[in-house]
Amino acid sequence: MAHEVSTSAGTLRGTPERGCVLFRGVPYAAAERFGRPQPVPPWSGVREPTGGPVPPQLPSSLEVVIGSPEPRPQAEDCLNLTVTVPDREGSGRPVLVWVPGGGYDVGAGTWDMYDGVRLSTAADAVVVSVTYRLGALGFLRSPGLSEGNLAVWDVVAALQWVQANAAAFGGDPERVTVAGQSAGAHLIAVLLGMAETEGLFTSAILQSPPLGLGLDRAEHAAETGARFLEALATDPRTAPVSAVLDAQERVINAAGSEGLLFLPIAGAGGVPDEEQLRRQVQARAAGLRVLTGLVAEELNQPAYAQPLQSFVELLTGAGAQVYRYLSRTSAPASPYGAVHCSELPFLVGTERAWAGAAMLAGWSWADVQRVGAPYLAAWAAFVRGEQPEVGGAPWAPLSAEGDGVAEL
């Protein structure tokens, strides 16, 4: 693999690491505050690898379970990618685009917990991790100020960048799988219902999608926007990021159990209403390959099991090929069991990134790799367009009735 690659905006230099070449801090779009993403201005010379800033955010409540991500600079100019490619010659490789989760208010594709080296190596694939805007900066709806759903358009822009540039990294733009966990999977379900994403990917992986969250309503999102502006009490176009985050936190705390306040909005900001989304999912389901599932602790949580069952029935009934799983794997000393996010270390991330994860208590990193090997092999086969296996036997896709969930 060449360590310098020419893209649509300029030349990038990658760093060889662990058998792959990593291109960090790759800009895929640029955006003004509360504006849709726009093409990146071209540059001259060779752009050196950077860590890439993460979106402005506050610490996550999930850190007690998954550990804390490495500290990275935060900046609004955060629309960047990490591209991971096997360090050997090749072309026409499948492409995996990873959309991280985090409840739409934390997360970044640049974090080492989403490092794509293992997936890239196992699947012989180009892995692209996406960073998109979060919270009010990504989802605020306020007429005349922000249309909402800006983060959705960030991910669309990233997928468009992949179409334009995958071949330069040895990838095949006609073999793109979009994958995500939690909020990332929820966002992918939205993308499946948007006409603008037709042709941008052919397969999808949705891990622990909290589909029971639904989508926000335009009217409710505007009410949230009004509460946010009241809490901010200054010009939102020029307010310091710290003030934006403080106002966002106060509005969320005041809402209590109301649920997520900054999330994709139906019928606003370029996203169709829920009925149109449903029809579009049905229309594109034939020929679509989907891998989706939950971890055991999510089975009794209303946002997960039944909504996913309904979504799977919609897909299979319209002709999609769906592989569904249930992960019961948990570490021996974990107080949480097979908890939300517990399958992530089997697929992505580095030993150092997951070292502080309480959900992995009792396992060495060698244990994580050993126990996670069936996950990694199955996901890699799916990305390559092959039929995955479970327990040494072919993993059969679901029937229209939803039979045949594979346990991992």
Image: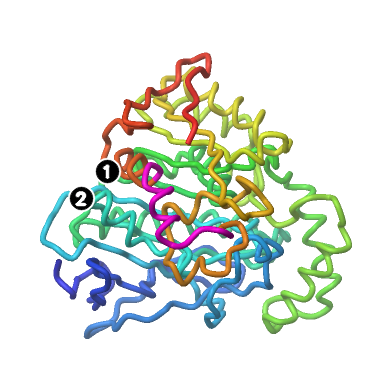
**Gap between marks 2 and 1 measured at Cα:** 8 Å
The residue type indicated by label 1 comes to: Arg
Percent coordinates x, y for residue 240 in the rendering: 69, 84
Rendered view: 21 above or below 177: below
Direction left: furthest residue: 89
Q: Is residue 375 left or right of residue 44?
A: right
Predominant secondary structure, magenta span:
helix
Residues 268 and 302: in front is: 302
Q: Are marks 2 and 1 in contact (CB under 8 Å)?
A: yes
Rendered view: 216 above or below 146: above
The label shown at residue 175 is: 1
Judged from the image, the secondary structure of the residue bearing numbered disc 1 is strand
* Residue bounds of the magenta highlight: 361-375
Judged from the image, the secondary structure of the residue bearing numbered disc 2 is strand
Q: Is residue 217 left or right of residue 382?
A: right
The label shown at residue 93 is: 2
Q: Quadrant of the N terminus?
A: bottom left
Q: Is residue 377 left or right of residue 147?
A: left
160 in the magenta segment? no
Q: Earlier in the sequence, mark 2 or mark 1?
A: 2
363 in the magenta segment? yes
Say if residue 325 shows up in the picture.
yes
The residue type indicated by label 2 comes to: Arg
Residue at image point 68% right, 40% down: 214
How many circles with numbers are drawn on the protein?
Answer: 2
